[in-house]
Image (tube, rainbow, N blue to C red):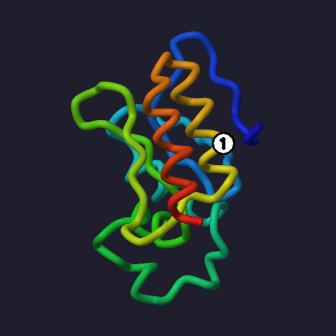
């Protein structure tokens, strides 16, 4: 099972999913500020280009460029996984997302994650 932070009652459905499958819950609408606040501890800061460090696009884009997935939904519904175009799910990410959707009774979405992973291999 994916390495995850256990969420308490009233769990947060939104956040960032690392390439290792670790989920970082983030309150709705706070994903950019969370990425900004945590970027130095999440990625090798020295590996970032100067352009990335001062980018107006935001640190969320830096995370996505490094394989992170954003779980968000502008309409406050069940989270949608968003990744950089052309990036594949890691096995750990697919495992987390499968469990995420099963736990919420979204069996078809869980099955789609597995189909997506199979198609990418």
Task: Judge the density around disc 1: few (<14), some (14-19), many (≥20) Cα neighbours within 10 Å.
Answer: some
User: Disc 1 designates what residue?
Assistant: 95
Residue 66 vertical position relative to residue 46 in the rendered view, above or below:
above
Residue 32 vertical position relative to residue 79 in the rendered view, above or below:
below
User: In which quarter of the view is residue 89 placed?
Assistant: bottom right
> Residue at position x 31%, y 25% from top?
77
> Residue at position x 29%, y 73% from top?
56
Which residue is more in the foreground, 28 or 53? 28
User: In which quarter of the view is residue 71 placed?
Assistant: top left
Q: Point out the residue furthest to the bottom here.
A: 50
Which residue is more in the foreground, 120 or 46? 120
User: On the rendered image, what quadrant is the N terminus found in?
Assistant: top right
Which residue is more in the foreground, 50 or 65? 65
> Residue at position x 44%, y 49% from top?
70
Q: Point out the residue furthest to the left here.
A: 75
Residue 94 horizontal/vertical position (percent):
60, 47
Callout 1: helix, strand or loop? helix
Q: Is residue 85 left or right of residue 74?
A: right
Residue 45 vertical position relative to residue 1 in the rendered view, above or below:
below
Q: Point out the residue furthest to the top here.
A: 9
Residue 120 horizontal/vertical position (percent):
53, 64
User: On the rendered image, what quadrant is the C terminus found in?
Assistant: bottom right
Which residue is more in the foreground, 67 or 55? 67
> Residue at position x 35%, y 66% from top?
58
Residue 113 horizontal/vertical position (percent):
51, 44
Residue 92 horizontal/vertical position (percent):
69, 50
Residue 79 vertical position relative to residue 62 in the rendered view, above or below:
above
Q: How many marks?
A: 1
């Amino acid at each position: 099972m994916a390495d995850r932070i256990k969420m308490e009652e009233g769990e947060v459905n939104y956040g960032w999913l690392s390439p290792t499958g670790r989920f970082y819950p983030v309150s709705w609408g706070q994903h950019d500020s969370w990425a900004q606040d945590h970027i130095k501890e999440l990625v090798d800061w020295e590996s970032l280009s100067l352009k990335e460090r001062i980018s107006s696009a935001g640190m969320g884009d830096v995370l996505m460029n490094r394989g992170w997935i954003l779980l968000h939904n502008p309409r406050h519904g069940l989270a949608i996984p968003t990744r950089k175009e052309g990036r594949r799910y890691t096995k750990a990410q697919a495992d987390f997302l499968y469990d995420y959707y099963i736990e919420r009774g979204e069996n078809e979405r869980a099955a789609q994650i597995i189909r997506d992973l199979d198609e990418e291999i």
